[in-house]
Amino acid sequence: MSASTIDPGRLPVVVIGAGPVGLAAAAHLVERGIEPLVLEAGPAAGTAVRDWSHVRLFSTWAELVDPAAEKLLAPTGWARPDGSTYPTGGDWAERYLQPLADALGDQVRYGATVTGVARAGRDRIVDSGRDEQPFTVHLRTMDGREERLTARAVIDASGTWTVPSPMGADGLPALGEKTAADRVTYRVPDLDDPAVRARYAGRRTAVIGSGASAFTALALLAGLAKDEDGTHAVWILRRGIGAGTYGGGEADELPARGALGLRAKAAVEAGHASAVTGFRTQAVEHDGERLVLVAEDGRRLDPVDEIIVLTGLRPDLSFLSELRLGLDERLQAPTALAPLIDPNVHSCGSVYPHGVNELSHPEKDVYLVGMKSYGRAPTFLAMTGYEQVRSIAAALAGDREAAERVELTLPETGVCGGAGLFDDPDAAQSGEGGGCCAAPATLQIGIGAPASSGGC
């Protein structure tokens, strides 16, 4: 049967990614009587979340469970965790995401990496009959086989975890960064792992970044320094140190986030870490067995043994190249959403709940959701993602009134800082752009952020 004779309404909606928002999308589709097919590149639900399983979230369980997902889980005997407690990434994956994926059964496929999405028989140039054609989704299985599926709509919830930003201040890898790859990591280290602990014990480590992930790395390394002589962190900031550098402290709306900032501050004050400000990395050079960071202004730091780069994440758009996406030229987020989350503008503004209207593209029935919908913006709320997919499921079901109705009230944590505001050393020194919401976190989940760059 040719693509032109297929009734798109009888096809599944392909959801890319079995993370929190992707699985929530599937739950909302099931609730609407629409068949989902979730394609997960990893071997289990929440593969990206499991990568930071050692990190505790800033959000409580009450903020991390989607309502439609909970309804789907109820018949399985699933017990909702205590809503007032804070899970780790591992807790979230094992106690919620995997049970949810199990409840969806064969509607979730593992080891399926999406390599391309297009309109059946139409590349991005062709106009004729475009909207009437279903989508073709190309994927690669874990054993290397290639497959092609057909879908009525595509919801991309693949996140940004797999594409960490480099250390170069211009958004490109610093000269020598790739050559030094064996000494550079883009994740918060798990120091409970003996091999990882040995990598940093008694060594000098550069930590590049200014958000919650960097705070976490500094706090962990400071703890290691108390046990292992010679352990020291060099905290590299592109901005200066101002009132908001360490977050909101005891006044932070999120106590766990405030406490983390205070731990990072204590690490510096105790001498376990030293801060280097206004440093925009241009190159990494070898000095024997050690590495030297060089700034755009020519400054050279004392040699370090390891480098931890926590400068944010960005979306992988390569497999969507045959679709007509409307993306902001700066953030790589949907054009209608970008003004609401732009870190060049928002330091403490709230991002109101949004749905299908803000997430639609020139290509009908394709949506980027979750962290991926925010492109390079540094802050995202899981509850926002749940509202996104509720709205999209309603739209796909033809219930436009429900799709455009807001069913979520968010706290005013907003988008807290980012590249535009916090890369300005003078603004940071004067206290501008810091203030109420603290330093920018790489990612926020629920009402708060994990102390990791974990994906959603």
Image (cartoon, rainbow, N blue to C red):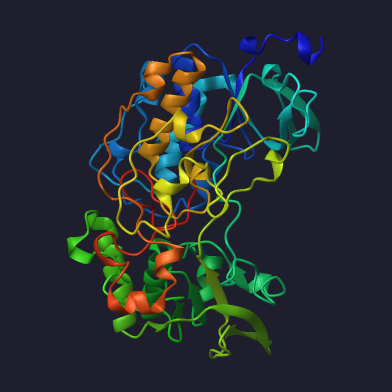
Residue 117 x/y as whole percent: 70, 33
Q: Quadrant of residue 116?
A: top right
- Is residue 58 rendered to the left or right of residue 455? left
Residue 413 x/y as whole percent: 28, 50
- Is residue 202 rendered to the left or right of residue 87? right
Task: Examine the rendering and report whether any part of residue 100 can be seen.
Answer: no
Residue 131 x/y as whole percent: 67, 21
- How many numbered circles are shown? 0
**In the image, what residue occupies the spot 42% across and 82% down?**
277
Q: Is residue 102 above or below residue 220?
A: above
Residue 169 x/y as whole percent: 56, 72
Q: Quadrant of residue 85?
A: top left
Q: Quadrant of residue 43?
A: top right
**In the image, what residue occupies the spot 30% across and 67% down?**
434
Task: Examine the rendering and report whether any part of residue 291 can be seen.
Answer: yes
**In the image, what residue occupies the spot 80% across and 32% down?**
146
For the N terminus, give its image quadrant: top right
Residue 217 or 173: which is nearer the viewer? 173
